[in-house]
């Protein structure tokens, strides 16, 4: 919806028109403008941090791998050998 022609959404629900306008408005803003409008982020999370967890469950067999500290994806699974994992939220210790 980035390159919308005028009248392209005529006859469409108003919510679609509002979404298209908001997308164009935000995509036209620079990083500094967004920070000025919304403020600094609470915390910057890197890709390496996002790919760490204290518990990983194999999506194929359900085997659970736990650790005291966040670890990267434990690939391959020790039980079935697949590489399909998802994070699991453990209760606080």
Image: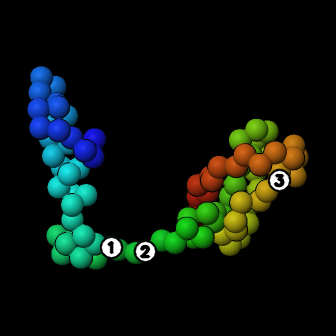
Instruction: Tell me the quarter of the picture where residue 71 sits.
Output: bottom right
Find residue 28 and report its horizontal and vertical position in percent: 21, 61
Left or right, 35 with respect to 44, comes to left
Tell me the residue that label 1 is attached to.
Answer: 41
Q: How many marks?
A: 3
Q: Nearer the viewer, residue 84 or 65?
A: 84
Up-down: is 72 above or below 10? below
* Label pair 1/3, CB-CB below 8 angstroms: no
Tell me the residue that label 3 is attached to.
Answer: 76
Disc 2 packing (10 Å; few <14; some 14–19; many ≥20): few
| Residue furthest top as drawn | 11
- Distance from the alpha carbon under mark 2 to that under mark 1: 7 Å
* Label pair 2/1, CB-CB below 8 angstroms: yes
Find residue 75 and report its horizontal and vertical position in percent: 79, 56
Find residue 21 and report its horizontal and vertical position in percent: 15, 46
The answer to whether residue 19 is seen in the rendering is no
């Amino acid at each position: 919806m980035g390159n919308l022609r005028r009248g392209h959404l005529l006859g469409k629900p108003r919510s679609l028109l509002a979404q298209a306008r908001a997308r164009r408005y935000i995509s036209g803003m620079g990083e500094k403008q967004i920070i000025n409008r919304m403020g600094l982020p609470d915390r910057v999370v890197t890709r390496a941090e996002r790919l760490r967890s204290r518990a990983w469950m194999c999506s194929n067999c359900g085997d659970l791998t736990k650790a005291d500290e966040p670890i990267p994806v434990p690939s391959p699974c020790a039980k079935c050998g697949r590489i399909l994992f998802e994070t699991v939220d453990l209760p606080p210790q």
